[in-house]
Amino acid sequence: MADAVDRLIDANEAAICGPVVLEIRRGLRSRAERAWVLPLLAGCHLRRGATVKSVDLLIAAYALAHGVPLLTRHAAFERMKRAGARLRLEG
């Protein structure tokens, strides 16, 4: 796996998002793990998205999973759409 990560970083194709970084950092148990993993994270592009509430994310995930539009005027869904979510918004 380390070879695949190194290849992606060397090709400037590695990307990661905030929640994944948080989860990885929380799982690091030793100085040796931190010394190995943190430089790999630094070599990744950080994907930025929209900051929204968890419930709004669940609603958006449901709509995307079922291929249905959302009838809403809630700004959070517009932010998600501008950040790249393929939401279909009506309203």
Image (cartoon, helix red, strand yellow):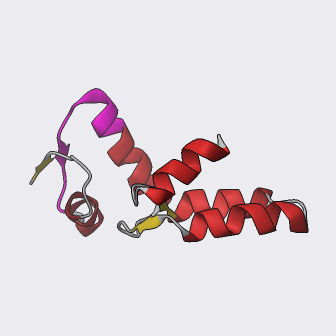
Q: In this view, does 35 lie to the left or right of 52?
A: right
Foreground residue, 60 or 85?
85
Q: Residue at 76% across / 62% down in the picture?
A: 36
Quarter of the image where the C terminus is located: bottom left
Q: Is residue 77 left or right of residue 58?
A: left
Foreground residue, 12 or 17?
12
Residue 15 in view, yes or no: no
From this view, report whether residue 64 is shown above or below residue 41.
above
From this view, report whether residue 61 is shown above or below residue 66.
below
Q: Does the magenta stretch include residue 71?
A: yes
Number of labels in the image equals 0
Corner quadrant of residue 14: bottom left
Q: In this view, does 85 lie to the left or right of 42?
A: left
Q: Position of residue 41 (x, y in %)?
A: 59, 65
Q: Where is residue 42 in the image (x, y as percent from the top left)?
A: 57, 71
Q: Residue at 28% across / 60% down in the picture?
A: 80
Corner quadrant of residue 77: bottom left
Q: Residue at 45% across / 68% down in the picture?
A: 46
Residue 86 in view, yes or no: yes
List the single residue furthest toward the top.
Answer: 66
List the single residue furthest toward the right.
Answer: 30
Q: Where is residue 43 in the image (x, y as percent from the top left)?
A: 53, 67
Q: Where is residue 1 in the image (x, y as percent from the top left)?
A: 65, 40
Foreground residue, 84 or 7?
7
Q: Does the magenta stretch include residue 41?
A: no
- Boundaries of the magenta span: 62-73
